[in-house]
């Protein structure tokens, strides 16, 4: 589907930031304040490619419409790290890695749970995230509900345990969605008129949020009490949404598709606030606001351009033909640090580091009357305080 977009409006951008900030401010008034400085010694990760630290099978050459199953194990992925590391990144870190690093943890990918040669510690926790997954089956990648079922098996087996109720309460769960359910929905309805398509997608957001809420409730019922929840990025600013096939460039965010992210993120916060008991501690990584610090920086002409992308429609970063000839273009390694997006969907490692520093430090924040601090990128709370780092 060729992306359809509206022209970029500075007033619209300011209005969206105003709405997002004040909706989050209202939500934080109803949230339970974080006290003390918890130090988590285990982390369990549920999600997709923004969290996947090596769960795609490197020996499976099956191709889907979003690339080969073993794509993150093939060049040029991992090129700044020296070799592919199973991440959808040019390096060896994605968002979940930075979060775990803050706690001094290296959770093991579920795929290699029984492999003692892996340079990760099963006692640090387990990462179940699989690139391409969502709350619904989509392309067959392990959906979040099935990842939670895998977690339950691990908890019951005692691998890395014992996981007593006390241990679970002191463990951290990172749950995140990057939009694969919506990408599938939009792809399956590509011939629907734009207005109807977006209205339908916003309605569909209700089903996605309902299932995500059930996932978090299931995790709570397993005994976990502390959750880092990743919100959707601005879906209209991802390179697959901004690419103009007729001109071959990436001129502007698709503001219509960004409405889907706003609907999902607002509904998710409200749904979890109502669904989870008061002793559940939640902090959000607001990818929509954080990504926007780059994607709406109009002084940077390359803000939306990926370093690596397929040569033609239907081709993706890392694709090769039958003769093993690359079917993608790649920026120079010298210039790679100037790119925010690595491929059609994911930030570079430098991009992730920039974003995570926003989440961790919240160097930009506003104060409400009375000096109340509001941390913009984590919807009101301090991530440092939450993590105890």
Image: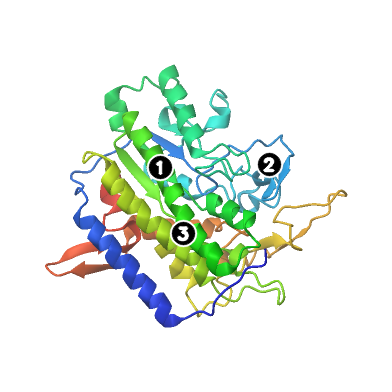
On the question of residue 118 being in view, the answer is no
> Is 8 in front, or is 196?
196
185 vs 2, left or right, is: left
Rounded to the nearest angstrom, the CA distance separating label 2 from label 3 is: 32 Å
**For the residue labelled by badge 1, is the local secondary structure a helix, a strand or a loop?**
strand
Who's the residue at 37% across and 43% down the image? Answer: 213
- The tag earlier along the polypeptide, 2 or 3, is 2
251 vs 8, left or right, is: right
Disc marking residue 145? none
CA neighbours of label 1 inside 10 A, class few (<14), some (14 to 19), many (20+): many
On the question of residue 21 being in view, the answer is yes
Name the residue tied to disc 1: 174
* Quarter holding residue 167: top left
Who's the residue at 61% across and 69% down the image? Answer: 305
| Rendered location of residue 276, percent (x, y) | 28, 41
Name the residue tied to disc 2: 70
CA neighbours of label 3 inside 10 A, class few (<14), some (14 to 19), many (20+): many
- The tag earlier along the polypeptide, 2 or 1, is 2
Disc marking residue 202? 3
Vertical placement of 352 versus 135: above or below?
below
Q: Please name which of the two marks, 3 or 1, marks the residue nearer to the observer.
A: 3
> Is 20 in front, or is 335?
20
Rounded to the nearest angstrom, the CA distance separating label 2 from label 1 is: 24 Å
| Rendered location of residue 188, percent (x, y) | 63, 54
Rounded to the nearest angstrom, the CA distance separating label 3 from label 1 is: 25 Å
């Amino acid at each position: 589907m060729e992306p359809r977009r509206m022209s970029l409006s500075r007033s619209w951008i300011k209005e969206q930031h105003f709405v997002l900030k004040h909706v989050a401010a209202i939500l934080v008034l109803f949230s339970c304040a974080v006290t003390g400085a918890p130090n988590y010694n285990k982390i369990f990760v549920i999600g997709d490619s923004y969290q996947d630290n090596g769960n795609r099978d490197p020996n499976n050459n099956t191709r889907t419409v979003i690339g080969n199953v073993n794509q993150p194990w093939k060049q040029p992925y991992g090129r700044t790290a020296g070799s592919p590391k199973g991440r959808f990144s040019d390096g060896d870190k994605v968002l979940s890695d930075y979060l775990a690093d803050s706690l001094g943890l290296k959770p093991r990918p579920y795929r290699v749970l029984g492999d003692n040669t892996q340079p990760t510690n099963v006692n640090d926790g387990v990462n179940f995230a699989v690139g391409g997954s969502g709350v619904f089956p989509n392309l067959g990648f392990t959906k979040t509900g099935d990842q939670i079922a895998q977690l339950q098996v691990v908890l019951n087996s005692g691998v890395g345990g014992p996981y007593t109720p006390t241990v679970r309460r002191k463990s951290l769960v990172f749950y995140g969605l990057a939009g694969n359910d919506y990408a599938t929905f939009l792809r399956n309805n590509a011939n629907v008129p734009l207005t109807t398509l977006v209205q339908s997608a916003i309605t569909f957001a209700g089903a996605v949020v309902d299932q995500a809420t059930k996932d978090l409730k299931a995790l709570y019922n397993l005994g976990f009490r502390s959750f880092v929840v990743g919100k959707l990025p601005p879906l209209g600013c991802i390179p697959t949404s901004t690419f103009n096939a007729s001109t071959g460039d990436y001129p502007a965010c698709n503001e219509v598709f960004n409405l889907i992210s706003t609907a999902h993120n607002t509904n998710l916060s409200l749904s979890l606030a109502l669904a989870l008991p008061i002793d559940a501690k939640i902090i959000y990584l607001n990818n929509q606001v954080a990504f926007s610090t780059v994607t709406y920086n109009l002084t940077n002409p390359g803000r939306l351009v990926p370093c690596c992308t397929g040569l033609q429609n239907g081709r993706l970063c890392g694709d090769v033909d039958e003769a093993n000839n690359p079917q993608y273009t790649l920026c120079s390694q010298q210039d790679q640090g100037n790119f925010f997006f690595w491929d059609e969907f994911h930030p570079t490692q430098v991009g992730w580091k920039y974003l995570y520093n926003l989440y961790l430090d919240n160097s930009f924040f506003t104060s409400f009357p009375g000096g109340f601090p509001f941390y913009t990128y984590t919807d009101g709370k301090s991530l440092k305080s939450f993590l105890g780092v």
